[in-house]
Image (tube, rainbow, N blue to C red):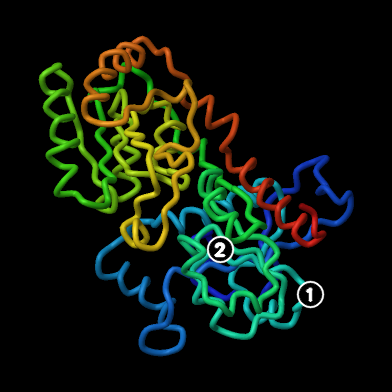
Amino acid sequence: MDIAERTRANPTSSPHGGTEVPGYFGTRGGERMVLNLFFEERDDRWFPGDRNLRPLLRRLLLGKSFISGQRRVLLNLCAGLDRLGIRYRVNDYRYIRKHPEELACIIGRPFVLDWFAWKNPLLLGVAMYDHPVDAPERLKDFNVKRVLVPCAWYANMFRPHWPHVDAWPVGIETDLWTPTPADQKSVDVLLYDKVRWDYGRYEPELIEPIRRHLEASGRTVEVIRYGHYKEDDYKKALARCRSMIFLCEHESQGIACQQALSSGVPVFAWDRGGPWQDPKYFPHKVRYEGGVSSVPYFDARCGMTFPDASGFAAGWSDFWSRASAGDFAARDYVLDHLTLEKGALHYYEIAEAAMQNRE
């Protein structure tokens, strides 16, 4: 049974776990705790349990579906835990009800908290609330040990509301997202369009000027739009392209961008800065301005950034020259910071610390 299949069941058999890693016994020096993971993308709609049937019906009718960022978090966490030999259960509600003393790690949506009266200590996130203002007052009645968000700027936005917040990025499958030899590349630029809000403004103000500039400079361009592709299509596009332009207002982690970096594709990223401008919150509910970024995991090895269309025009030549010369080392950054094993171990250590009330 692959990881994706595990999330569609409520397993009651023995916990999942991979090959034990020699010499790793957990930070307590003894038996490692078994993680109880819970993830749901959707609530029941028509009858109890139909949330598990609807994706299967959709897959039968439409084929393999787009993998959301939230689901990718669970899949990559489980893969990393398997590699480390750390055992876990997925969506075993029967077990967790019988063991109220054990930590429940709720990765998915907050409606899971409504399904029964949780008595367990809880580790919430990273896909729970977009902002603490969304949390119901009754959340104070739960034994929440820690809240996870994907990056430091997001954690800083949460801390005035919830002090017990950790930044945790999930790992990237570096053995799947691998570089393609330069002589097999056929396209200069992959334009990754993840502009989510006010598209009518940014298409003429940002996207089209970038495309015109690339065409004028003689570069070949392939475009991919967030939410309108399958993961295999994106992987093949990265294999064809020598560089990527990443357009997104801001990111809490940016898994797609990191998949490109793992593939050895340097990135020229739109990083506009300014306040967190999710229109559900800004400016009427939340005003936060503190290091907001579209590439929260990024350094000089990964590529370069630009603030707007004029900044793109000013910096493109330098970026392309360095990318063509092989001056960037994007994959090295991911190997240093964002492997499956590093992400899974970090998650386990946060969970263990939460149960020991360590700060």
Identify which residue is drawn at 49% across, 71% down: 8
Q: Amino acid at mark 2?
A: Ile
Locate residue 152, reporting x and y percent: 56, 43
Q: Secondary structure at mark 2?
A: loop
Whether residue 80 sits left or right of residue 120 in the image: it is left
Q: Amino acid at mark 1?
A: Glu
- Rounded to the nearest angstrom, the CA distance separating label 1 from label 2 is 19 Å
Whether residue 237 sits left or right of residue 109 in the image: it is left
Query: From what the image shows, is residue 121 above or below residue 299?
Result: below
Judge the density around disc 1: few (<14), some (14-19), many (≥20) Cα neighbours within 10 Å.
Answer: few
Judge the density around disc 2: few (<14), some (14-19), many (≥20) Cα neighbours within 10 Å.
Answer: many
Q: Which mark is residue 208?
A: none
- Which residue was labeled with disc 1? 101
Residue 141 lies in quadrant: bottom right
Query: From what the image shows, is residue 244 above or below residue 111?
Result: above
Contact between marks 1 and 2 (CB within 8 A): the answer is no
Query: From what the image shows, is residue 32 above or below residue 50?
Result: above
Along the line of sight, the residue nearer the viewer: 177 or 208? 208
- Which residue was labeled with disc 2? 107
Q: Secondary structure at mark 1?
A: loop
Whether residue 43 sits left or right of residue 221 in the image: it is right
